[in-house]
Image: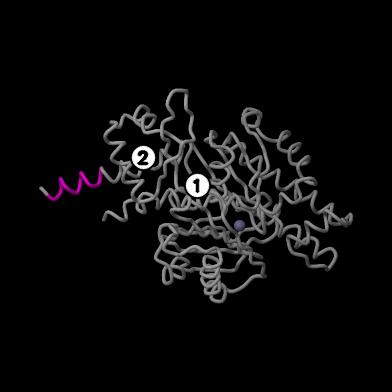
Amino acid sequence: MEDVKIANSEYIRDLNLASIFRLIHKYGPVSRKELSDNTGYSPATISNHVKRLLDNGFVKETDKGSSTGGRKPVYLTVNPERGYLLAMDIGVNYVKIYLFDLNLQIKDQLEIAGRKKRAEELMPFLVKSLKEFCRKAGIDTDKIIGLGVALPGLVDNEKGYLHFAPNLKWHNLDIRSYFAEEFAFSILIENEAKAAVIGEKEVIYPGIDNIAFVSINEGVGCGLIIDGKLYLGASGNAGEFGHIIIDSDGPECHCGNSGCWETLASMNFIINKYFERTGEKLDSQEIIKKVSFQPDQELLSIVKECAHNIAVGLVNIVNSLSPELLVIGGDIIGLKKYIAEDIERIVKKNALNISYEKANIVYSKLGNKAALYGLARMVFDNSIGREIIKDYI
Ligand SMILES: [Zn+2]
C-alpha cells in the first residue's frame, strides 16, 4: 500500500512537470505568476517544477515577455536546443529527412532522390543516412527525442508496422525494428496523409477542428481531424477515400476492386494515361515540369480529366464528412493552376449545398513539408513527457 502511494505521488509529480513544460512550450515566454494565475497550480508548485525544468535544461529564463510595466519579471521559455526530433517522409521517388528543435522549428534537412527500391535495400541505407545526417548536423543521437516515419500506405502505428504501401510495392514490414536496432530513441510510424493533416492543423490552422486532408501523389491518401482529434477508426486506417469506387467499370486497383478514386484521380492516372496515349513514360515531377513549361494538348486534356475525377471524390468527402476545411496536398499541388478552377466548379455544382457552404477548399500551405511537420508534432506529443522525467527515474 505504501509503495502504491509513493508511486502515485511520483506519477502525479511527473505528470505536473510534463504539463507545466507543455504550457511553457505553448504559451512561452511566460512568467511563473502567469502560469500560476492561469492554471490553478499554486505558486509553490510552479516554482518547484520550474526549478526542475531549469535544472534539467528544458526551460530557460529570459527577460523578453509581455510585461505590463513596473519591474520586469523573469520569463520562461523552452530551450530549443535541449533536444531534437527527427522526421522522415518516405515517398515513391524520394526520402526526406528533417531535423526539428524543441520549438518544432526546422534545423536541418536532407532530401534523397531515387527511384523505387526494395525495402531490404533502402532501409539499411536510410539508417546509415540518418546517422550521417545527425553527425553532419552536429547533433549527438543522445539528444534525439524521437523519430517519426511517414509512409504512403496502411500502417499499424502501435507496432510500428507497415501492412502495405502499394506504390512502393512494400508488404508486411516491421519498419520500427530497422531503426530500433540502431537507435535508442522512440520511433513512430504513421501514414503520410495522417501526418500531413496534423502538420497542416498545428502550423497553419490551429483553431479549426474538422479538417480533411487529401494527399494526392502517386496514390490518394486522406487524413481526418474530427472534433479536434486525428480520426483513426477501429483499424487505425480510417480515411482510405482513395478506395471509394467512383466508376465500377474503371481501371483495376491494387486493392482488388475496379475504378477506385485513386486509379482515376492521382499522379499515376496522369502518368499512365499519358504513357498509353503517347508512349512516353514520365514520373510525377517530370509531368509537373512538362505541364508548366512545355505542355501539349494531350497532356492538358488528361490533367483536365484528372481534375474532374478529383472533384467527384471531393464531392463524396464534402457530403459524407461535412468538413470545415478540405485541404488538397501532395504532388498534385504542382498542377494547382490547371486544376483548381475545374475542381471548384464541379464540387460547387454537385455537393450538397448545406455541406458545401461550410467547406472551405484550400491547397496545402506547407506543401511537401506537411507530413514532416506533423511527424515532429506527433513525436513531441508522444515522447516529451517521458523525456522530461527520464533523469529522475
Ligand atoms: Zn482500390
- Give me the residue at 42% from left, 44% from top: 60
Observer-nearest of 34 and 112: 34
Image quarter for residue 206?
Answer: top right
Provide the residue designation for mark 1.
103
What secondary structure prevails in the magenta region? helix
How many marks on residues?
2
Local secondary structure at mark 2: helix
Within-10-Å neighbours for mark 2: few <14, some 14–19, many 20+: many
Could you say where residue 12 lies in the image, as x and y percent from the top left?
Answer: 25, 43
**Left or right of 382: which side holds 305?**
right
Q: Position of residue 154 (x, y in %)?
A: 52, 59
Type of residue at label 1? Asn
Is 135 on the left or on the right of 39, as rendered? Answer: right
Crowd rating for badge 1 (residues with CA inside 10 Å; few <14, some 14–19, many 20+)? some
As for residue 95 lying within the magenta part, the answer is no
* Residues drawn in magenta: 3-12
Question: Foreground residue, 334 or 274?
Answer: 334
Q: Can residue 176 be seen from the camera position used here?
A: yes
Query: Which sits earlier in the primary sequence, circle 1 or circle 2?
Result: 2
Q: Amino acid at mark 2?
A: Ile
**Image spot of residue 222 (x, y percent):** 58, 49
Q: Residue furthest front?
A: 71
Ligand 1 occupies quarter: bottom right
Question: Residue at the location (67% across, 67% down)?
Answer: 113
Residue 355 coordinates in the image, percent (x, y): 62, 31
Distance from label 1 to label 2 (Cα)?
A: 15 Å
Give the quadrant of the C terminus. bottom left
* Disc 1 to disc 2: CB gap under 8 Å: no
Residue labelled with disc 2? 20
